[in-house]
Amino acid sequence: MTRNANNRWLGGVLAGIARSLGLSAGLLRGLFLVFFFGVGGLTFGISSGATIVIYLIFWITLGKS
């Protein structure tokens, strides 16, 4: 699993994960926004601050493609 340098908005983390899982990057970006903003209470106890920390951890640990 690597970050996608060609299809990125911030760091390519979600695009890289989507490519590895065979999903749409737009789908994962949408899910990220749902968790970040807590739309409809669908955060499963994950705060927006924790979402950012999780994203940064993936950004640091995943290499570039």
Image (tube, grey):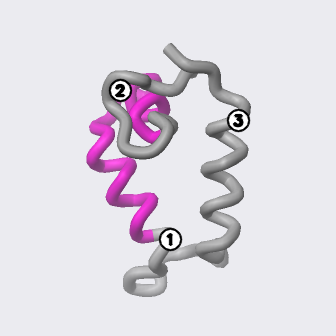
Q: Amino acid at mark 3?
A: Ile
**Distance from Cα at disc 3 to Cα at disc 1:** 19 Å
**Distance from Cα at disc 2 to Cα at disc 1:** 23 Å
Q: Which mark is residue 22?
A: 2
Query: Horizontally, is 3 left or right of 56 in the view?
Result: left
Q: Which residue is mark 1?
A: 36
Q: Do the CB atoms of the residues marked 2 and 3 lie less than 8 Å apart?
A: no
Looking at the image, which residue is at 51% across and 26% down? Answer: 3
* Secondary structure of residue under mark 3: helix
**Distance from Cα at disc 2 to Cα at disc 3:** 22 Å
> Within 10 Å of the Cα at label 3, are there few (<14), some (14-19), or many (20+) other Cα atoms?
few
Disc with the residue nearer the chain's start (2 vs 3): 2
* Secondary structure of residue under mark 1: helix
> Within 10 Å of the Cα at label 2, are there few (<14), some (14-19), or many (20+) other Cα atoms?
few
Looking at the image, which residue is at 32% across and 30% down? Answer: 7
Q: Which residue is mark 3?
A: 60
> Within 10 Å of the Cα at label 1, are there few (<14), some (14-19), or many (20+) other Cα atoms?
some
Residue 10, image quadrant: top left
Q: State whether the magenta stretch is mostly helix, strand or loop.
A: helix
Disc with the residue nearer the chain's start (2 vs 1): 2
Disc with the residue nearer the chain's start (3 vs 1): 1
The reply to whether the magenta stretch includes residue 28 is yes
Disc number lying in front (2 or 3): 3
The reply to whether the magenta stretch includes residue 48 is no
Query: Horizontally, is 40 left or right of 63 in the view?
Result: left
Q: Amino acid at mark 2?
A: Gly
Looking at the image, which residue is at 33% across and 34% down? Answer: 23
Which region of the structure is painted magenta?
Answer: 14-34
Disc number lying in front (3 or 1): 3
31 over 20 or under it: above or below? below
Query: Horizontally, is 27 left or right of 4 in the view?
Result: left
